[in-house]
Amino acid sequence: IAHGKAVRATQWWEGARDVLLQYAQAGTPRYVYDLATVRDRARNLLAVPAIDRCFYAIKANPHPAILRTLVQEGLGLECVSQAELDHVFATLPELSPQRVLFTPSFAPRREYEAAFARGVTVTLDNVEALQRWPETFRGRTLWLRLDLGHGEGHHEKVKTGGVAAKFGLPIARFDAFVDEARRLDVRISGLHAHLGSGIEDPRHWRGVYAELAGLADNVGTIETIDIGGGLPIPYTPDAQDFDLAAWRTGLDEIKSAYPRYGLVIEPGRYLVAEAGVLLLAVTQVVEKDGVRRIGCDAGMNALVRPAMYEAYHGIHNLTRFGDGATAAFDVVGPICESGDVLGRSRLLPEATGEGDVLLVADAGAYGMAMANTYNLRALPAEAVIA
Ligand code: LLP
């Protein structure tokens, strides 16, 4: 199917074409981030009265300028590794540890100890860690991550609940965890669930809050309920914008039903995906058996999402922006893998040729963060528009 009908609202980069072409001239592949867009998305979320605190999941894009922008806007930061914690405090030495969450998965013991030493909020998602490392956890305060029995999201690989997923304590073991915690004088002050990424149903989060609040009422020490991230953005030309108004109404309603708990969210993608573009240079245009391919100077090494999740990203010829996009091309990278395809049957200008700059849209989340050096290709450069 050929995609090309642009029904989406104008995006920031359409007005920044000259600046972007200059950046491309300085070298591609290159990610460029627009901080005004990051700020705009942060303000959308902070305007929701039911939300008490918002933590940015830095795994989506740990660029220092993005971290500084979001912290200035009043957000906290969520980290999943000791290296992410180190990066956050190196970037923002003045940041209060109260504004940092540590939500690792299968981390080694020393990472929990390092996080406690820093004074950040640690989330644990299994009882075995308490049993195996009692001295690490004794007397601590922590949050508990639960698996509510089902995963959600844009692809199987990003669902983080249910039997197939490695994350979260199943509800069936909730009492066992609470007993073990009591034995070790561990205080559970928060309940957490993040069931996946790119969840389209705006009612999902109110459901998570309701479920966790029901459990929290039985524990007695819970102050905070963290309903995770997972907010989607519209990647395809025909995708609807996320219904933020319905999301907000749901949270307002459920918060007034259970007003005792602080409501925390930890989005990544929503804050940064649309703020980032990937600029590539066309290397070769080739026709084979009726399929026309545009080759670029980076592919799945710079942006792995299409290869990994069959994710869609809009692709535009920035050099010939405004020319009719009338010819269908597969857009591919230089990596020695058949899966190195950024987009299939994309409509682009007929004259697209060597040296043109292509723009891959909505690449600000899980783009650079997942880039790799496969085939010994260099990592993309980055630039920021303040
Ligand atoms: N909180 C936790 C505990 C998470 O594991 C994640 C993402 C988030 C928050 C933020 O989720 P977001 O709001 O960005 O959906 N690489 C995949 C996404 C993996 C998400 C991993 N966890 C992708 O490119 O679609």
Image: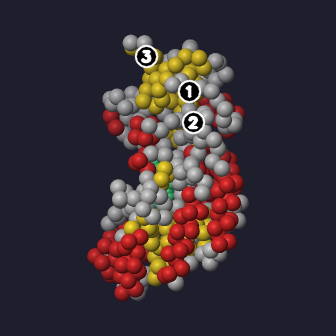
Name the residue located 69 percent from the left edge and 50 percent from the top edge.
40
Measured in 3D between alpha carbons, the distance from the residue under mark 3 to the one under mark 1, in whole angstroms, is 16 Å
Badge 1 amino acid: His
SS type, badge 2? loop
Measured in 3D between alpha carbons, the distance from the residue under mark 3 to the one under mark 2, in whole angstroms, is 22 Å
Q: Are marks 2 and 1 in contact (CB under 8 Å)?
A: yes
Name the residue located 50 percent from the left edge and 18 percent from the top edge.
354
Q: Which residue is mark 2?
A: 236
Tell me the quarter of the picture where residue 175 sits: bottom left
Tell me the quarter of the picture where residue 123 sits: bottom left
Taking 301 as reference, is 49 left or right?
right
Badge 2 amino acid: Thr
Residue 100, compared with residue 130, is above or below; it is above
* Image x and y of residue 156, in percent: 41, 47
Badge 3 amino acid: Val
Tell me the quarter of the picture where residue 103 sits: bottom left
Q: Which residue is mark 1?
A: 3
Residue 65, compared with residue 53, is above or below; it is above
Name the residue located 42 percent from the left edge and 83 percent from the top edge.
186
* Image x and y of residue 101, in percent: 50, 67
* Image x and y of residue 100, in percent: 53, 67
Q: Residues within 10 Å of mark 2 (few under 14, many from 20)?
A: some
**Residue 291 disc label:** 3
Of 67 and 230, which appears nearest the observer?
230
Q: Is residue 76 visible?
A: no
Q: Earlier in the sequence, mark 2 or mark 1?
A: 1
Q: How is the image coloured?
A: secondary structure
